[in-house]
């Protein structure tokens, strides 16, 4: 389709923009990137006089001016999308940017994205959550007992997530963290598990707002103050809810303060982390129903992020390691997206954020307020801030490097035939 071939109904086109924009918000994309995509769609279809205002929970689109102005507004954000839905959504966005669909066809395709059923049944997705939890534990604390316990806890939390009760959405993070903490603290008391605070992080990793907080920092750096601040508050509240559930379990069972202090435990060796990346990728694929064609690319980006993070930690320490992981994975993510069958950037970005675990340090810090006092918590809070800023800065620099290299390559390609 070409905008010259069809007369586009402005009202229907406006509805399409609203629905697509709010779906991209549900996918977790940054506000400025969503606005850029919507404006490219507007330019492609040749509709003039459209104004777009986007916030993390609402979208305003106005057509016309004065008495003829028409405003479309939506404030209801759909539930978070799975990776297969994100893949389908951004393929729709690309097609709209090329003008390949009428607004009616675009709306129907979007409804199909929401109706898309998971690739795997609930038992397999539950098992996938257990697998990704075990894989992450191989990075956090690779001990045989820790990995086995993480697998069992991941299976239990994954089963809880399959219940999908809308009325419990707000309190589900508290319930999940409380039940997980009860199981961990009881196991630590009777089975003598080492460093239980790290064991708490792995089963709850998909609740951690690492990507939200990192994107919030990026939006603040890009001048999106309202969006960045609201995401930041949302991420901090999510961490607080998780921490509250853990501290409630601690208070109920009278667990020793020492159990809330993070400390180093000898693991299986450096090889465990690399195997953990592979296991984690497999778990992500199963639990979030990622398209099969995206699995090799998810694994590639995870390996790049993990390798760069380890190199950064060896050279500059753990606080800045996230910068190197993010700076290395971002060009890879953007390059993969340009390939003919490459997945959209969010499909590979989100698992990488969970691997870098920017939210894990925040969860540990909240629980250490009880375990080590406010002085220890303040030091941990400083580490969290540095971690988030370094990851966001790594994404920004990685994006700038990719765009510079891509622009340079394109100019060289345009020049070469003249030689």
Image (cartoon, grey):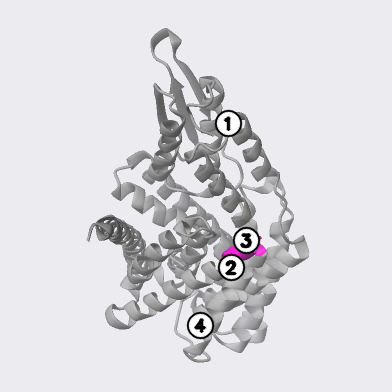
- Is tag 4's residue or tag 1's residue first in the polypeptide sequence? 1
Find numbered disc 4 in the image and state the secondary structure of the residue it sits on: helix
Q: Which residue is label 2 attached to?
A: 295
Q: Residue at x 72, y 48 (%)?
A: 165
Q: Quadrant where the C terminus lies?
A: bottom left
Task: Say which label, 1 or 3, has the lower sequence index.
Answer: 1
55 above or below 14? below
Pointer 2 with pointer 3, Cβ within 8 A? yes
> Residue 317 appears in which quarter of the rendering?
bottom left
Q: Would you identify the image quadrant in which residue 410 lies?
A: bottom left
The location of residue 339, given as percent across then percent down, is: 48, 60
- The residue that appears at 44% across and 25% down in the rendered structure is 47
Q: Nearer the viewer, residue 106 or 246?
A: 106
Q: Is residue 210 magenta?
A: no
- The magenta stretch is 287-294
Q: CA distance from mark 2 to mark 3?
A: 7 Å
Could you tell me if the residues under marks 2 and 4 are in contact, i.e. CB atoms within 8 Å?
no
Expressed as whole percent of the image width and height from the top left, the position of residue 28 reads 50, 49
* Mark with earlier residue (3, 4): 4
Residue marked by disc 3: 290
Q: Which residue is mark 1?
A: 102
> Where's residue 13, x and y in %?
53, 26
The kind of secondary structure element at disc 2 is helix
């Amino acid at each position: 389709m070409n905008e010259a071939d069809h007369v586009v109904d402005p009202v229907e086109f406006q509805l399409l923009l609203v629905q697509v924009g709010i779906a991209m918000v549900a996918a977790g994309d940054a506000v400025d990137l969503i606005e850029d995509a919507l404006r490219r769609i507007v330019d492609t279809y040749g509709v003039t006089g459209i104004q777009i205002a986007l916030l993390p929970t609402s979208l305003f689109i106005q057509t016309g001016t004065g008495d003829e102005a028409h405003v479309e507004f939506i404030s209801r954000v759909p539930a978070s999308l799975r990776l297969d839905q994100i893949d389908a959504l951004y393929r729709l966005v690309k097609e709209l940017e090329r003008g390949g669909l009428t607004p009616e066809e675009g709306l129907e395709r979007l409804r199909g994205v929401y109706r898309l059923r998971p690739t795997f049944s609930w038992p397999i997705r539950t098992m996938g959550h257990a697998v990704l939890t075990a894989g992450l534990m191989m990075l956090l604390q690779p001990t045989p007992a820790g990995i086995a316990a993480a697998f069992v806890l991941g299976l239990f939390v994954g089963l809880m997530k399959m219940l999908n009760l809308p009325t419990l959405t707000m309190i589900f993070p508290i319930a999940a963290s409380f039940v997980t903490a009860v199981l961990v603290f009881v196991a630590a008391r009777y089975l003598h598990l080492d460093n239980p605070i790290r064991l708490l992080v792995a089963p709850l990793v998909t609740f951690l707002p690492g990507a939200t907080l990192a994107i919030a920092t990026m939006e603040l750096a890009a001048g999106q103050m309202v969006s960045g601040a609201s995401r930041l508050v949302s991420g901090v509240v999510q961490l607080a809810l998780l921490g509250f559930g853990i501290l409630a379990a601690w208070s109920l069972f009278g667990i020793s303060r020492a159990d809330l202090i993070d400390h180093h435990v000898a693991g299986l060796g450096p090889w465990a982390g690399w195997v953990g990346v592979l296991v984690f990728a497999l778990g992500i694929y199963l639990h979030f129903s990622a398209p099969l064609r995206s699995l090799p690319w998810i694994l590639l980006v995870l390996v790049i992020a993990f390798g760069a993070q380890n190199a950064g930690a060896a050279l500059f320490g753990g606080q800045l390691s996230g910068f190197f992981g993010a700076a290395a994975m971002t060009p890879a993510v953007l390059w993969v997206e340009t390939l003919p069958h490459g997945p959209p950037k969010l499909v590979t970005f989100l698992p990488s954020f969970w691997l870098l675990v920017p939210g894990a340090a925040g969860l540990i810090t909240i629980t250490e307020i009880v375990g080590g006092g406010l002085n220890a918590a303040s030091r941990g809070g400083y580490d969290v801030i540095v971690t988030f800023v370094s990851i966001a800065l790594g994404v920004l620099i990685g994006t700038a490097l990719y765009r510079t290299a891509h622009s340079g390559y394109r100019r060289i390609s345009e020049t070469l035939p003249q030689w």
